[in-house]
Every structure is written in C-alpha cells, then in structure tokens.
Amino acid sequence: MNVAIIPARGGSKRIPRKNIKLFCGEPMISYPIKTALQSGCIDRVIVSTEDEEIASIARSYGAETPFVRPKELADDYTGTTTIIRHALNWLSEQQQAVEFACCLYATTPLLLPHDLQAGLKQLKANDELDFIFSAARFSFPIQRALLQDVDGGVRPFDVESIKMRSQDLAETFHDAGQFYWGKTSSWLQPDRTIFGPRSRMFVLPDHRVQDIDTPNDWHRAEVLYQLLQQEQHNADTVSG
C-alpha cells in the first residue's frame, strides 16, 4: 500500500488558518488531496492534524483522518519527518503495511498528478535510494548573492564568486516543498535524511513552484495557478 500523508496543523501564524483558507474558491488543503487521489499511485490520503475543522474539511474531499495528532506534535518546532514517522507508526500499530509514503504539504496547489507518478517511478527504479523530493533551480547564481550591512552598505556573499561569469558557476537547486516520496523503512530510520546521498531531486519548472508564507506569496500562487489551469485547458483543447 502507498499512502500520502499531509501534515496540517491549525496554528499557522503568518497566514491564519492557511491550510483551509479559500484559494481560488476552494480550501487550500483540497488541492493536494485531489491531486493525490487523481494520481492513481496513492491508495490512501491521510491528513495528520490536531484541528477538527481541518479534519472535517479534509474528509469532505476524500482524505482520511484516522487519528488526532498529539498536541505535543502540533507546535512551531516539530519537524515534518517526526510527523510522518508518527503517522507511519500509527498505521503499523494497526497492522496496516505501507511500502511507500509520500509527504505532501497542505499548501501545494501547483502540484500535478503526473509529478507524483513520475516521482514514485523514479524511486522504485533504484533500490539504493531512500527518497525522491521535488526541487527547483535557482534562477540566479546564489554564489553571487549580496549582503547588506546594518548601515546599508553592500558586500558580496562570496568575494571570489562575484567576479565570475554566471555560466562558470555551479548550478544550484532548492527544495520545492511540494512532495517527498520515501520508502517506509527509510522514513522510520532516524539516521536517514531527505537531503542526502541516497536521495534524488525531481526538478519542477519554475512557474510551478511557489512558497506560500505571506499574503504576497498567496496572491502570486493564485496567479500561477490560474495560468496553469489555462495552460492545461489549452493543451486539452489541442489534443481533443
């Protein structure tokens, strides 16, 4: 059995109730739930939350909330991996075997079903791997970043790299924060890290990656989502 686990606590600070705030007319958490169910490679979608309103909305879109997340795992400091381990341990205690588990963040409206399919396929293709996670390229060389002093002065982050041509610097990537496929055995081993040699990146196009931490982020994500929907509609029209 393959499961998707969506961490969704109720205490978002920067955007209150972010996980169920309406995004283009639907609760934010509905998007990853629907995408996971549409992917065809996920048997169950489980939402880990301590919040009954979030749980109720999640169930209305087809997710399961078979347990209530303990309060001590719903604070600002509990890491995502701890939450995934809690869910997988709970399933194991219920004699529900899980082969592959995918962590999906609740704020991923730009995720597409074929991303999940391709990510799982990539993980299954190599027995040596523990994780496949979504990533994106930095659009500008981070080695040429600038720092601002307290008095407003500017200095290069890396004095040597600032002198180099962009094309001569190593390409860099960042975590896209959309999905993290892993073997259950890998999730449950504390010494295994997602960002390590036994992981691989599934690189997404820039226009489908957006952190959503501020109201400006939210607005930009809605614009990108609407453009993505139009792009898909145009593609369907051409193929039809």
Image (spheres, rainbow, N blue to C red):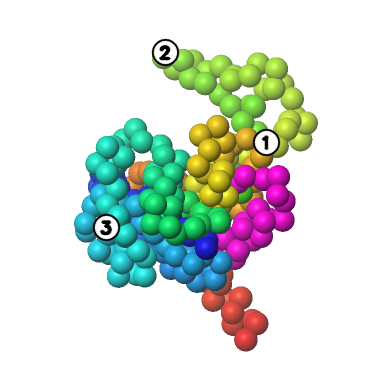
Report the magenta residues as a range.
109-131
User: Are there few (<14), some (14-19), or many (20+) residues within 10 Å of tag 2?
Assistant: few
Residue of label 3: 54
Q: Identify the residue at image location x=41%, y=39%.
A: 82
Q: Identify the residue at image location x=64%, y=81%.
A: 238
Q: Residue furthest top?
A: 151
Q: Position of residue 100 (x, y in %)?
A: 55, 55
Residue 146 placement: quadrant: top right
In the foreground, 187 or 218: 187
> Cα distance, mark 1 to mark 3?
36 Å
Disc 1, SS: loop
Disc 2, SS: loop
Q: Which amino acid, mark 3?
A: Ile
Residue of label 1: 197
> Cα distance, mark 1 to mark 2?
41 Å
Q: Which amino acid, mark 2?
A: Asp
Q: Position of residue 63 (x, y in %)?
A: 37, 65
Asked if residue 130 lies in the magenta stretch, the reply is yes
Viewer-nearest of discs 3 and 2: 3
Residue of label 2: 151
Q: Which numbered disc, 3 or 2, marks the residue that appears first in the sequence? A: 3
Q: Identify the residue at image location x=56%, y=39%.
A: 194
In the foreground, 138 or 16: 16
User: Are there few (<14), some (14-19), or many (20+) residues within 10 Å of tag 1?
Assistant: few
Check whether the beta carbons of the residues at disc 1 and disc 2 lie within 8 A of each other.
no
Q: Which numbered disc, 1 or 3, marks the residue that appears first in the sequence? A: 3
The C terminus: image quadrant: bottom right
> Cα distance, mark 3 to mark 2?
45 Å
Q: Position of residue 64 (x, y in %)?
A: 35, 64
